[in-house]
Image (cartoon, grey):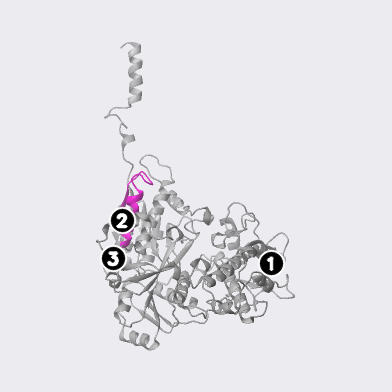
Amino acid sequence: MPRRALVVWLVLAACLGPGPGAPGAAAADDPPPVFKIAVIAPLSGRLAAAGEEALAGARAAAAFHGGGRTVARKVEIVALDDADDPAAAEKAHLAAFAAKVDAIVAAPTGRTLDAVVARARKAKWAPPLLVAGGALPTRLSLDPGDPVLALGAGAVDEAIAVANLLVLPCRAKAPALVVEDGPRGRDREAALVRNLGHDRTFVAIVRVAPGAALSDADKRVLGDARPDRLVVAGEPDLLDAVLAAGLGVPVLGGVGTLSTASAAVRDGKAAGATFVVGTPQRTLAGAPRPLWDAVEATTPAGKAVSVLPRSIDAYTAVELVVEALATLPTKGKKGPTDAQLLAAVRDRRYGPDESRTPVFDVAGRASLYHFGPWTATETGVAPTDPGLVPNDAFGPLLGLRRPTLYRAEPGTRVVWVTFGDATSKPPRTIDKDLAELGLATRGYEGSLDAFLLDELLARAIGKLHRLFLRNEDGTPIPGVSFNVSFTTERPKDVKPQDTWTMVCAGDDAEAGGRAFPGEGRAEVYATFLRRTIFQAGALTPRVDHDDLAWVNGTHRWQGVKLEHLRADQIRALVDGYAGAFALTGAHELGHLAGLGHDTSDERSIMNVNEGAGLRETAAFFIPSHATVIERLIGRAPVPKEPKK
């Protein structure tokens, strides 16, 4: 072959590439490997409809995001039945391993949640397992390698939401509680009782075995108590059991009860019931449009479209996994490792308006989680008109919480939180500060001023507990919470080295607070925070006698739109001021623990540059600082597992 012809042939060969039979000939054209996500849910038995709701949400997310829209890989959903049985849930996890899935979404019941979580943590094979459905595992973990992440909140957060909704929109004065008997039910009962309100109790409490009907004795107890609202805490079939009892009392269903697994919901016989529904902030506006379209396509003509919470949760879980996958580099047919995918899921974040807060917090729970009411009608269920519901972003409703809820817990580092007095360091200023904000009457309405002081202090302590990874009501989360408790009562019979003092008073030319490690004392300058952050938003008109019923919780609600706006205006300002006390106080207490300033993360509690204006719900102690605090005061102990 002439030299010139050989050169031309080589150039053409290089451009055309290898022939059809050559090694690697079609590699560039091979479709990317399928990305498999297992969905473990009850797909048979009494709660099968709940599992089908989750499965529908997962499939809608896979169809929308896979195959080129978010990732090039096709996303396949592998359905696995846990049959509402712990042993079957463990087998389903083994089946996921056999199917070689890349991630798992679990939509379990209260009976199966801990079983599938325990199996995931014991297995050497550890793809991300996202729990959808609003509940948390009994045990949380601070290990960043823990494969379990939960799109939900704890029993205390649910209880605070229930207490709020019993006030509005339910307007209940004498609620009773029907709870599914079992370990999870007992946890929910304790949280509901503790957080119902400082002067409120359930007129009756009835415990019902899973899947059982109310006994005649149960009916007599509830009938004799004459409740005006029944709080139902359990699975969807417990709702059927309550309605079948024929008590004629309206229902407030707790997290997890709203599902077509309830015959009453499915057949439109739950009309008038209200349900507590939780959601992470990314789905606060309701069902994502692709999910709505998928459900609408399968809804019979003439019937209202209802996208239920389990579908939204499972859709969100699959969406988070696929979005995480999209951030990882692809290497031919080989996908990311389990550890890489888990780290990417943990790094999914909200936008700049939320300070880029991760979707999951350090304990693997959904951060920025919200609760709201849904209402059942004869044609379906839907979120309650927001004009009838106070804003849930401002914490418990006014009048529900008092500082006396918080007591020093034995064996913890006790922090005494006080507004000070005339002789304290610094001297008391809170009465003047609240008056300047329009939140006090300067003594003209003494009881109103006292209620607002209590409200402010109780909220500040609740937020301090959250910043130290405890529940808002002060109860610890085993293995997660720092071993500290906050109280308004001056500690007695506690060693000086086991106590700190936090005084919220005074002013400073440069800072919102200062720490004095040698004295175990932190100062939070109430006047500085008021004049630099909150004075521009002072309450107008200022509080007066007409506001007393809002503040002490005795207002007689009428159930009309927007009647809560004045109460929300007061609550928002009090809650924001309390949040500033808590965030500044946590920063100064950090100094007492030996921490220095930090600029590595804009959400760091010890970041003095970014701290101004940061909402306390977005702040946290970075890992290195958390380690220092843990060495000093430890974590809440984990109870020993009972012997089998």
Which residue is identified by label 1? 527
Specify the quadrant of the image occupied by residue 615.
bottom right
The residue furthest top is: 2
- Secondary structure beneath dot 3 equals helix
- The residues bearing labels 1 and 3 have C-alpha atoms spaced at a distance of 56 Å
Q: Residue furthest right?
A: 423
In the picture, the disc for residue 492 is none
**In the image: residue 611, left or right of residue 246:** right
Give how far across and how far down residue 461 sits, in percent.
Answer: 58, 71
Q: Give, as a single range, the part of the protein colored magenta.
A: 53-77
Q: Earlier in the sequence, mark 1 or mark 3?
A: 3
Question: Quick check: marks 1 and 2 in contact, CB under 8 Å?
Answer: no
Whether the residues at callouts 1 and 3 have beta carbons within 8 Å, the answer is no
360 inside magenta stretch: no
Could you tell me which quadrant the C terminus lies in?
bottom left
Question: Is 7 left, or right, of 614 in this rendering?
Answer: left
From the image, tell me which residue sits under label 3. Answer: 49
**What amino acid is labelled 3 in the image?**
Ala
Q: What residue did someone put label 2 on?
A: 294
Circle 3 or circle 2, nearest the eye: 2
- What type is the residue that disc 2 sits on? Ala
Category of crowding for the residue at label 1, using alpha-carbon neighbours closer than 10 angstroms: few (below 14), some (14–19), many (at least 20)? many
